[in-house]
Amino acid sequence: MTKAGSVAVEHLTPDAKGLISRLLGPAVDEIGDMLREMIVVRRQKNFYRIATKAAAMVVEGAPTPIALSTRTAVALLYQASLEDEGAGLENQWAGLLASAATGTSVPSAYPSILSQMTPLDACVLNALDSAQRDRLDEARQTIAALGQTSGLSGGVLMEAVDNLLRLRLCVITTAENDDVISRSHFWPVDKSVLQMTVLGTNFLKACRGPSHGSSEAA
């Protein structure tokens, strides 16, 4: 392997190296070889940067978790390495990694879901979570109100909402009752209420990491 094709693991902080060892257990050397062979220098840098962020999120004295399954570990490492610096979801990837390192359930579906999201999707999801945690009335949880909170409108807002529905992180109901509206229907934005699913709630919590369970992920 050429020097240009490698980023030494020694470039990681001690905390970040410890985090990776805790996650991968005996497989750390084998997966390290896979990373060196298969991932270009840019993706290695991406992952090491996110791992360093994750290490900073881990609460001191957190219990040592059971090592991740191969399926979850590979999905998380692979997808996180695709997040370029400044792309907008670094904190969420670091949160998933830190959550897994402290024993929070991180199913293999979570990296797949996050890899299909945009920063605008995350903005809407955070705005919805804030409205629900503050127990605001349904009028504050309509698509129109969430658009004002998140600063999005028009087609950009609706595309974000549609993607959150596709990923099953949210559902839409009418303000008059709890009937779920199909994604194929037209939504009156001032009457349609966006609600997080159980999947959406658990996913967002995992993305915030162990020390950010009650605050928004940037």
Image (cartoon, grey):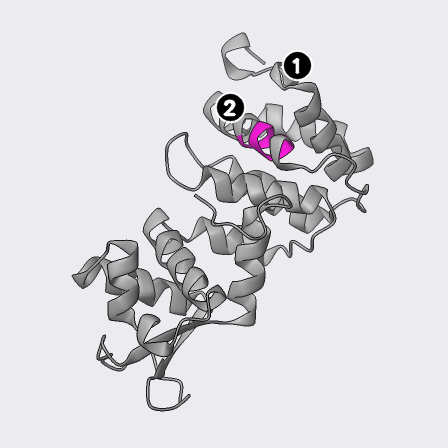
Report the disc number at residue 45.
2
In the displayed structure image, the side of residue 1 where residue 14 appears, left or right: right
**Could you tell me residue 93's position as x and y percent?**
52, 42
Report the disc number at residue 112.
none
Kind of residue indicated by mark 1:
Glu
- Assess whether residue 54 is covered by the magenta stretch: yes
Label 1 sits on a secondary structure element that is helix
Read off the magenta span.
Answer: 50-55
In the displayed structure image, the side of residue 140 where residue 52 appears, left or right: right
Which residue is found at the position 30% from the left and 79% from the top? Answer: 192
In the displayed structure image, the side of residue 18 where residue 3 appears, left or right: left
- Assess whether residue 79 is covered by the magenta stretch: no
Task: Examine the rendered structure and indicate whether residue 169 appears above or below residue 45.
Answer: below
Which residue is found at the position 24% from the left and 69% from the top? Answer: 144
Judging by the rendered image, the residue that carries numbered circle 1 is: 10
Kind of residue indicated by mark 2:
Lys
Which residue is found at the position 64% from the left and 41% from the top? Answer: 98
Q: Residue furthest left?
A: 154
Task: Examine the rendered structure and indicate whether residue 20 appears above or below residue 110.
Answer: above
**Could you tell me residue 81's position as x and y percent?**
51, 34
Q: Nearer the viewer, residue 176 or 167?
A: 176
Q: How many marks?
A: 2
Q: Nearer the viewer, residue 77 or 14?
A: 14
Give the position of the C terminus as an image quadrant: top left
Our reading of the magenta stretch's main secondary structure is helix
